Amino acid sequence: MARRNKVKVIDAPPRKVTILGAGSWGTTFGKILADGGADVTLWARRPELAREINEAKRNSDYLPGINLPPSIRATASLEAAVNGAAMVFVSIPSQSLRSNLDALKPLVSDEAIVISLMKGVEKGTGLRMSQVLEQGLDIDRERLAVASGPNLALEIAKEQPTAAVIASDNLATAEAVAMVATNRYFRSFVNTDVVGTEFGGVLKNLIAVAIGIVDGVGYGENTKASIITRGLAEMTAFAMAYGAHPETMAGLAGLGDLIATSSSPLSRNNTAGRLLGQGYSFADVVGRMQQTAEGLASVAPILTLAAARGVDMPIVQQVSQVLAGTLNPRDIAPHLTTDSLEPQGERPNDGRQNRGGSALWRPFQRAFNQLRDGGRGSSGD
Ligand SMILES: NC(=O)c1ccc[n+]([C@@H]2O[C@H](COP(=O)([O-])OP(=O)(O)OC[C@H]3O[C@@H](n4cnc5c(N)ncnc54)[C@H](O)[C@@H]3O)[C@@H](O)[C@H]2O)c1
Ligand SMILES: O=P(O)(O)OC[C@H](O)CO
């Protein structure tokens, strides 16, 4: 099927931008854009929430105590929200995205840029959100972008200085979005590593659940620092196996977001993990969460993707076992990197197992082989 029109480079703030999803991140991103000078419309599923945003300039369920910019408008009509929008930002739970795309597809103009603000992968397909958008909207990847980084909504809504990264296959698209998503307290950087930027946002959630679990058990800073550091190694090996650049995992969408999400009680993933560590069952935790904790649904598809490329993810594996009730949360730390007692190399090329071609080392070998072969071979996307 023929793709819809290619991106038109925008060099001034667009006339109208729309955010789909008036939860904590969608509403906060609306404030970011409005404070940067854009004309923002929020789509809220519930008419009463749209009314509260329009009349009180508040979203008291998701952002208590925050005054929204007077210029923000909200509507429960998808058509009214998207009509005439030069940019459409999507901020709904990842597992709900696909079911919204049939209604959205005829409404998005052929020149609009569509930006994922989401940090999950689709259960069943294992697709990243930009891939689901590409399929469901039949849109050229040049018109797609993703936003990620250490972005706890409530801190940003309070205008605490924060950075993010906007990634697109087309640098001009990323730059156009970054221009709009920048204001006095929020700065957007750009890159062209969509795979790394998206997977960074997904994977840090899983490590943040692990941190929450050990926090709930009562373990201290050594355990958490060990998990964060080895978690970053797992994230990097996984993302590189799918064609991401290692620098992206050391950047805002990787390490930056891992630090923020793992250390903040504002994080829903961290909170879900803490409840698991305190002994609540998976079902209890899901019942207690008022907002979206994406990591819980991403564990299984990420482990499937990891197995497909031969990447070991021992920490994520243990999170999966705690979720399934087959591992006592107290035992997550003794199993920190592996059940094997044989010494493992810390870096990809240290240690006997790794030199022999362990799963963590294989993505680095693949990247090296690609470089050596002049970039030929699979990009992994
Ligand atoms: N909150 C944050 O700090 C933050 C920061 C960065 C990225 N994100 C990501 O943004 C995405 C949205 O998270 P959030 O924090 O806004 O979640 P949230 O739970 O606060 O809000 C989700 C929104 O989606 C709507 N929604 C729920 N089911 C829907 C459906 N089936 N169809 C359409 N809309 C539906 C809800 O009504 C709500 O408005 C997630 O992928 C999350 O990882 C969140
Ligand atoms: O509340 P969480 O755990 O979904 O994390 C929110 C953001 O992704 C932090 O960058």
Image: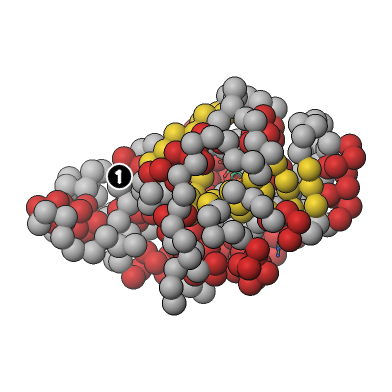
Amino acid beneath label 1? Pro
List the residue tagged with mark 1. Answer: 246
Residue at the (61%, 67%) spot, across then down: 105
Q: Which of the pair 336/130 is nearer the observer?
A: 130
In this picture, residue 172 sits left or right of residue 237: right
Estimate the x, y position of residue 156 in percent, counting from the top left: 64, 31
Q: Is residue 310 left or right of residue 164?
A: left
Residue 341 is drawn in which quadrant?
Answer: bottom left
- Horizontal arrangement in the rendering, residue 69 relative to residue 317 (left or right): right
Residue 174, image x, y percentages: 44, 43
The image quadrant where one finds the N terminus is: bottom left
> Label 1 crowding class (10 Å Cα cut-off): few <14, some 14-19, many 20+?
some
Secondary element type, mark 1: helix
Quadrant of the frame with the C terminus? bottom left
Marks counted in the figure total 1
User: Where's residue 316, x and y in %?
Assistant: 45, 57
- The residue at the point 61 percent across, 60 percent down is 108
Q: Nearer the viewer, residue 256 or 243?
A: 243
The quadrant in which residue 292 appears is bottom right
* Nearer to us in this view, 7 or 94: 7
- Colour style of the rendered protein structure: secondary structure
Residue sitting at x 88%, y 47% = 51
Residue at point 84%, 50% (across, down): 49
Front residue (pair 288, 6): 6
**Vertical placement of residue 200 versus 33, above or below:** below
> Residue 368, can we see it?
yes
